[in-house]
């Protein structure tokens, strides 16, 4: 046992850490904590992550929050020179794509999926869905163009940069991506990896078991 604990139900951004742990073949404990007062905002959890959000990991006694900081840390610790780039420049490119994913596309994909897939049909807001698609249009074109030139974000091999961006936009696989063929092919390729499929199975199970009131809460607490 590596002493790694991953907190957060797989429906949340904990999916990203779970995918990385599976990609690396790590032995870990998954604590499928729920959002809100029953889980991530309980006094015990706030003592670990004062943000009250998921995911967080404890690796032996090292505590880390922010999903993509977690994946970068795990990749660097366990797969330097493989999943984690060996050169300074390639490492910086992995950071570039990771920060890009969080700042440019994370929120839009989340809002789109709530109002296209996850909320009960009668509660989906078409205006929010359309606005999310408008916000995503320009960055998705950038991603599509980057992937027209090479099969993966840093070149010929799958790395933490691909895992981070593909994990952040994984719910976009349900969008009509026909105008973005290189993005679509790359996202499909990434999500078909055995580690991704195993993590996605956990995510789908958690999605299917999520009561509508939790999904409503997620839609309510989404920051504007
Ligand atoms: N930037 C953070 C965002 C974390 C986040 O917002 N997590 C959501 C679940 S996916 C959460 O815990 N929401 C519950 C809340 O804010 O009360 C990360 O990537 O880890």
Image (cartoon, rainbow, N blue to C red):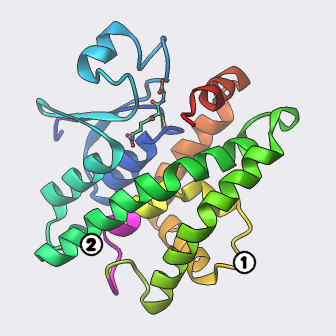
- Provide the residue designation for mark 1: 178
Q: Position of residue 146 (x, y in %)?
A: 45, 82
> Badge 1: few (under 14), some or many (20 or more) residues near its Cα, within 10 Å?
few
Q: Which mark is residue 137?
A: none
The quadrant the C terminus occupies is top right
Quadrant of the image where one finds ligand 1: top left
Q: Residue furthest top?
A: 43
Q: Residue at x 80, y 38 (%)?
A: 124
Residue interval drawn in magenta: 155-163
Q: Is residue 157 magenta?
A: yes
Query: Visible in this render: residue 195?
Result: no
Q: From this view, report whether residue 116 is shown above or below residue 135.
A: above
Q: Residue at x 58, y 79 (%)?
A: 185
- Provide the residue designation for mark 2: 93
Q: Position of residue 136 (x, y in %)?
A: 60, 61
Q: Secondary structure at mark 1?
A: loop
Q: Secondary structure at mark 2?
A: helix
- Total labels: the figure holds 2
Q: Position of residue 53 (x, y in %)?
A: 40, 28
Q: Is residue 196 magenta?
A: no
> Badge 2: few (under 14), some or many (20 or more) residues near its Cα, within 10 Å?
some
Query: Visible in this render: residue 163?
Result: yes
Asked whether 71 or 60 is in front, the reply is 71
Mark with earlier residue (2, 1): 2
């Amino acid at each position: 046992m590596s002493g790694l604990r991953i907190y957060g139900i797989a429906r949340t951004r904990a999916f990203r850490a779970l995918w990385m742990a599976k990609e690396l073949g790590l032995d870990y404990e998954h604590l499928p904590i729920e959002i809100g007062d029953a889980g991530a905002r309980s006094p015990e959890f706030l003592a670990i992550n004062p943000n009250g959000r998921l995911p967080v990991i404890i690796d032996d006694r090292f505590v880390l929050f922010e999903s993509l900081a977690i994946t970068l840390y795990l990749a660097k610790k366990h797969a330097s020179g493989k999943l984690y780039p060996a050169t300074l420049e390639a490492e910086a490119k992995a950071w570039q794509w990771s920060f890009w994913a969080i700042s440019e596309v994370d929120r839009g994909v989340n809002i789109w999926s709530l109002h296209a897939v996850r909320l009960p049909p009668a509660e989906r807001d078409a205006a929010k869905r359309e606005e999310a698609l408008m916000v995503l249009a320009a960055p998705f074109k950038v991603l599509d163009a980057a992937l027209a030139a090479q099969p993966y974000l840093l070149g010929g091999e799958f790395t933490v940069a691909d895992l981070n961006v593909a994990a952040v936009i994984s719910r976009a696989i349900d969008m009509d991506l026909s105008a973005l063929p290189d993005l679509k092919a790359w996202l499909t390729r990434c999500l078909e990896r055995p580690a991704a499929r195993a993590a996605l199975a956990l995510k789908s199970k958690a999605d299917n078991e999520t009561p509508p009131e939790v999904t409503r809460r997620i839609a309510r607490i989404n920051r504007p």
